[in-house]
Amino acid sequence: QVQLVESGGGLVQAGGSLRLSCADLGRTSSIHTMTWFRQTQGKEREFVAALGWYSGGTVYADSVKGRFTISGVDAKNSVYLQMNDLKPEDTAVYYCAGDPRGYTTLVLRRAAEYRYWGQGTQVTVSS
């Protein structure tokens, strides 16, 4: 059974870096697309970045391009989000999401597409 668990959130000053991790503790190898979303209070979940697990393809939101990098390690059933040059507007709860369907099949930016979700990890960027 898929169980996604995020870690790595915290408080950082603007311009700093954080690395988020998301592990599939169930080690089912059934997830083909892994994606990071973020959410602030009162707003819908916002797409951040997606990874096609077997293709290696990546997609980024315009707001994070050039600053964030999504990657995965198959042996660890984990996906990472390296976040550099953080800005106060990056403050949010970050969620990883997974789905058994392929990276080119999903509407990647649509949260309702994803079957599995982690519990979220808070990222706070101070100015």
Image (spheres, helix red, strand yellow):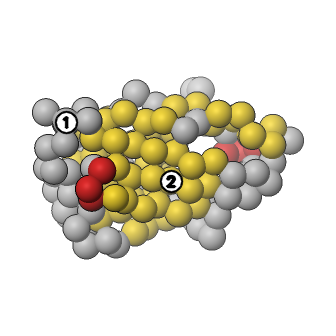
In the displayed structure, 70 sits above or below 40; it is below
Q: Residue furthest front?
A: 75
Other-residue count near label 2 (Cα within 10 Å), few / some / many at <14 / 14–19 / ≥20: many
Q: Of helix, strand and loop, which one carries label 2? A: strand
Q: Which label number is shown at residue 26?
A: 1
- Viewer can see residue 108: no
In percent of width and height, residue 8 lies at 55, 38
Q: Which label number is shown at residue 55?
A: none
In the displayed structure, 60 sits above or below 89; it is below
Name the front one of labels 1 and 2: 1
Quarter-of-image position of residue 3: top left
Q: Which residue is at the front of the view, 36 or 104?
A: 36
Residue type of the residue flagged with mark 1: Gly
Q: Of helix, strand and loop, which one carries label 1? A: loop
Can you say which quadrant of the picture contains the N terminus? top left
Residue shown at the point (27%, 50%) measured from the top left: 77
Other-residue count near label 1 (Cα within 10 Å), few / some / many at <14 / 14–19 / ≥20: few
Q: Is residue 36 left or right of residue 16?
A: left
Residue shown at the point (44%, 48%) measured from the top left: 36
